[in-house]
Image: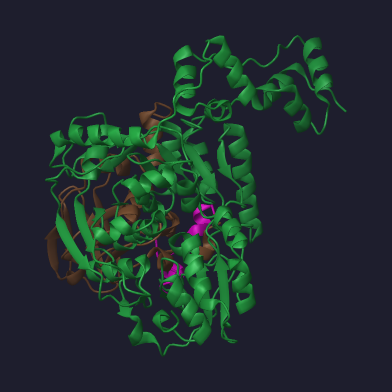
Chain colours: A green, B brown
Amino acid sequence: MKIPHKKELIELQKKYRTDKRIGEALGGVPAYLVAYWRRKKKIGRYSYPKYSQEQIRELWERFGDDAKAGEELGIGSHAFRRWRKRYKLKEKPVQLKLEQLKLELDINFNLLRKFMKYTIARNLLASKAGRKKVEVGEIVEVEPDLAMSHDNAGLVIKQFRQIGVEKVWNNRKIVIPLDHRAPAESEKTAIAHKSIREFVKEQEIRNFYDIREGVCHQVVVEKAHLLPGQLAVGTDSHTTSYGCIGAVSTGIGATEMAVVWATGRIWLLVPETIKITINGKLPKGVYAKDVILNLAKRLTVEGANYKAIEFYGSTVKEMSISERFTLSNLSMEMGAKFAVVPFDETTQTYLVGRTNKNYEPTFAGEEAEYVQEVELRVERMVPQVACPHNVDNVKNVGEVTRIRIDQVVLGSCTNGRLDDLEIAARILKGRKVHPEVRMLVIPASRSVYLQAMERGLLRDFVEAGGVVLNPGCGPCLGAHQGILAPGERCLATTNRNFKGRMGSPQAEVYLGSPATAAASAIRGRIADPREFL
Amino acid sequence: MLKKIKGRVWRLGDNIDTDVIYPGKYLPIIEAQEMALHALEGYEKDFPKKIKKGDIIVAGANFGCGSSREQAATSLKYAGIACIVAKSFSRIFFRNAINQGLALVISKEAHKLVKEAEEVTVDFANGKFSAKGGEVNFPPLPEMVMGILENGGLIAHTRKRLGIAK
């Protein structure tokens, strides 16, 4: 074993901090030996940056938990406790109760009366830009609250290195889950994943989720990395999904993300907003997916290009966060920049237990100005299917029931959550997948996977003849795990049916709800789920 | 910097999506030159081979809709496309193209004027698009966007802003 030089040891200490971790990095050198070398070379113990009293107090009041507060600073729970004791913060803070939050909400509404004519996008971008008001069409420069990248972080890293900035602007605001090609399907991907893992260590990016965790968007929402009233950018078009919890979020490219990592800033155009009001009780066999596909048909694939969408109405009010997720997710397919379901009790309940952080939801004013208002009643809606090769090529399920299929994909960020799997399992239980159909089931996240396991849903799928894959994007984007051959057809609960999306350009992808997927898997043809309910 | 571009036209339709421009299976590629070998491969298998340096794409509405993959813009730029003229661009593609330093023109009328493979001129200084079928004016891009384009893309632009490069 070669003893490292003083310089090397200092470098190692910068990277790994403790003797124990330095030892591990050197391949299992015991900590006492590293400490001995240090003393010999006159290198002190790693000293953590000094945290101010306000900082510690603020974190303590926000979390009331040493481990969670420590995590924000990148230190352990014991270390945080020592800091806390140094500043004599002994009593546990009063936790925010639901009622207190509600009270705050009322106050918020009052504050917002000033901006009665503002949409959510305008209100939020104005506050992010630190301005009283902003106009539609204006370009503002803002700091996002979250910057999400997935496997394409590999490309972001390459671009980031070209800029010539050493450290990322904020290692707590970057989230990287690996999901698109997880586990790595090729050597190229394996190399990219490896470079991401190394970068994450080097930059001390804490919110990194390796291949085990699930689809990036699901992970962000599930783990409350973003909160209502906050702004996110992500290197994935379906970043609009976070609108389901009342956040404002949008997709950008890798180069743009590299610049966000380097500078913490991004320019955004203040968009016009479309107000979509959905009313009525959803009939049997009709779900959020059918509603949004129907909307895509009405508005077309560029109907919301450059625009924000806000969802209102009794149907939306009744929807769970998972269903709202489907709305915000697929709004991207109409070109939407943001797609927000305003914060309400459902959002609040969803976030209890997921976060202790304070947040301030953003609302639209009562007289907000919209560029377009769309109203939709759903009582008479029937299950919808988007036919090749555009998401707005939507038909009633009855028009396409003769079409034979070779594969069914149940999963993705659009429809891979517990309620989606439950609906499909209910239909499949006691029945069999058609012998000529390959049914792939891909839970959206590890947490969904575990819950589906506990409830016996995975068993139902496997018994019916389905194949359960690991959480991730699966074949949605044509990367792996179920690529289509020329001439094959697939019914998927995913979000895109473009030519060549799931493999061969001569293959066809149809999009439908989890119920339609399950019914079609049984029939071997696209089927109306209402016949099974 | 951007003044006049003259080039041969590739005439494409509406809703040319990112999976057509750059199929998902090539996403692990990170070298721009290699990306260029697959530009618009989903549209026509041999398309990348047919593109000549300096060609201009004239497309319909919603060009580049779909994924946020910037490889769609990068592959076109490195395949030699000098400029894309379209009735409209999808939001993310628009940003990606500008960030890569690929010039864009939004014009509702240009598509009607051109025939496949003819030579057209895009005059940025005067905001004029000319083909055999006639001439149309197009509005300039916002000043800030033009700045990124003129610096040769967002990386170069940022380096300049941060004072890393002159």
Q: Which residue is at a point 45% across and 40% down the rendered structure image?
A: A258
Work out whether A141 lies above or below A416: above
Residue drawn at 57 percent across, 27 percent down: A74
- Indicate whether residue B45 is drawn in magenta: yes
Query: Which range of residues does the magenta coloring cover?
Result: B30-53
Q: Is A490 rendered above or below residue A36? A: below
Quarter-wise, where is residue A208 in the image? top right
User: The C terminus of chain A is located in which quarter?
Assistant: bottom left
Q: Residue A382 in the image: x percent, y percent?
A: 31, 78
Residue closest to the far right: A1
Relative to A185, B64 lies left or right: left
Is B77 magenta? The answer is no
Left or right: residue B130 versus residue A212 is left
Occupied quadrant, residue A381? bottom left
Extreme-front residue of the structure: A99
Q: How many marks?
A: 0
In the image, what residue occupies the spot 50% across and 72% down?
A424
**Residue at 61% of width from left, 33% of height from top?**
A202
Please give left or right for residue A99 compared with residue A506 in the image. left
Of the pair B49 and A445, the residue shown nearer to us? A445
Of residues A226 and A255, the one nearer the viewer is: A226
Horizontal and vertical percent position of residue A390: 34, 72
